[in-house]
Amino acid sequence: MHARSWIRPSCVVALGTALLLCIPLVAMHFTNEVRWTAGDFVVGAVLLLSAGTAIVVGRRLTTSAWSRRLVVAGVLLVLLLVWAQLAVGLFS
């Protein structure tokens, strides 16, 4: 596999992460209910970048459409569970 074949998906993951993190950044200007610190943005970026990278790698390592769907669903499930735990302490 060539190095160039990883550039486009990596850019899509990075751009998607940046766009998703713009939502709370803009919301903080309009309401006092959204109060994110720099640490919150760092953790969010790490979570989204790692989930996106895991999806890209998992899709490349699997061959069937069914297994690719399972990889995406599994990564998204783990992402949502970790995000919920960090946000509201779902499991404690």
Image (cartoon, grey):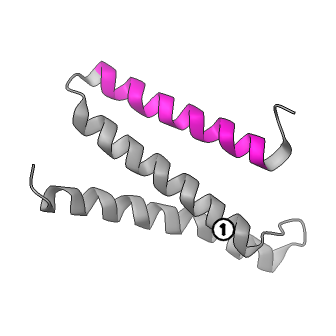
Q: Quadrant of residue 69?
A: top left
Q: Which residues, given as a range, are shown in magenta?
A: 66-86
Q: Position of residue 9 (x, y in %)?
A: 29, 56
Q: Name above or below for residue 24 compared with residue 29.
A: above
User: In the visual, does 49 lie left or right of 90?
Assistant: left
Residue 56 counted in the magenta span: no
Farthest residue, direction left: 2
Q: Residue at x 75, y 71 (%)?
A: 27
Please name whichever residue, 69 or 82, is drawn nearer the observer in this view of the structure.
82
Tell me which amino acid carries mark 1.
Phe
Farthest residue, direction right: 32
Q: Name above or below for residue 14 compared with residue 60.
A: below
User: In the visual, does 42 lie left or right of 34?
Assistant: left
Q: Residue at x 60, y 66 (%)?
A: 21
**Residue matched to label 1:** 41
Q: Quadrant of the C terminus?
A: top right
Q: Position of residue 91 (x, y in %)?
A: 82, 31
Residue 85 counted in the magenta span: yes
